[in-house]
Image (tube, grey):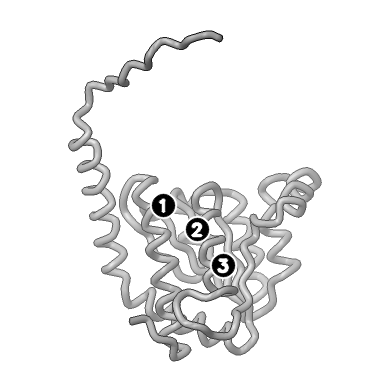
Amino acid sequence: MTTLPPTSPVRTGADPALVVGKHLDGLAATLDAVRAHAPVFAAWGAELASRLSSGRRLLAAGNGGSAAEAQHLTAELVGRYRGEREPLSAIALHADSSTITALGNDYGFVEIYARQVRAHGRPGDVLVLLSTSGRSENLLAAAEVARALGITVWSITGPGPNPLAEASDEVICLPGVTPSVQEAHLVAVHLLCEMVDSTLGRSVA
């Protein structure tokens, strides 16, 4: 049996308190911007509640960590956020691996969301796009198709101006580095859920 030598502690030379503090300071600045957009989140959540409760559908998409938060949003709506309520129709467009790989193989990565918007979207539906850069070509293609079909496009991005902001019906652009914006996406998802539940008369206490 081979005995491995003891592992030496990793020495980075950086003060951990400074690293953590810098990260949290950056996140705090981004969250301040989220707070400043509270009226927009309130309006979006109320509108989303109205549309979903009347039979419309939410489509959501992002890439990487933003895809995870898009899926988080749809899970909260199909399931429950806090209190019990009727399930609401919401689809995360990246979550079907067979569809994504088939579309990527046959039509290219740029089309993986746009083609699904054509398949699932109907006039009056809402497409929520999450992006730290606002420059992802597959999200831009999805926004273009959605607007042509009469689907409302809301985007939450990193710093503006950016192409996705221009391609959306409404947008919230958040300042900060990529990790801070991505972490703020989770807060944004929960704010939308808070407003949906509040509008539908569910307690958020």
Q: Going 64% across and 67% down the picture, which residue do you hit? A: 91
| Residue that badge 2 annotates | 69
Give the position of the N terminus as an image quadrant.
Answer: top right
Relative to 130, say whether 148 is above or below: below
In this view, which residue lies farthest toward the front?
Answer: 1
Is 100 situated left or right of 194 in this image? right
The mark closer to the camera, 1 or 3, is: 3
For the residues bearing labels 1 and 2, Cβ distance under 8 angstroms: yes
Q: Going 24% across and 55% down the picture, which residue do you hit? A: 28
| Residue that badge 3 annotates | 75
The amino acid marked with disc number 1 is: Gln
The amino acid marked with disc number 3 is: Ala
- Judge whether residue 128 can be spotted in this image: yes
Relative to 182, say whether 203 is above or below: below
Relative to 37, say whether 19 is above or below: above
Judged from the image, the secondary structure of the residue bearing numbered disc 1 is helix
The amino acid marked with disc number 2 is: Glu
Question: Residue 40, position in %: x, y?
Answer: 37, 75
Q: Which mark is residue 182?
A: 1
Question: Residue 79, position in %: x, y?
Answer: 57, 73
Question: Residue 64, position in %: x, y?
Answer: 54, 47
Give the position of the C terminus as an image quadrant.
Answer: bottom left
Q: Earlier in the sequence, mark 3 or mark 2?
A: 2
Q: Which mark is residue 47?
A: none
- Judge whether residue 151 can be spotted in this image: no
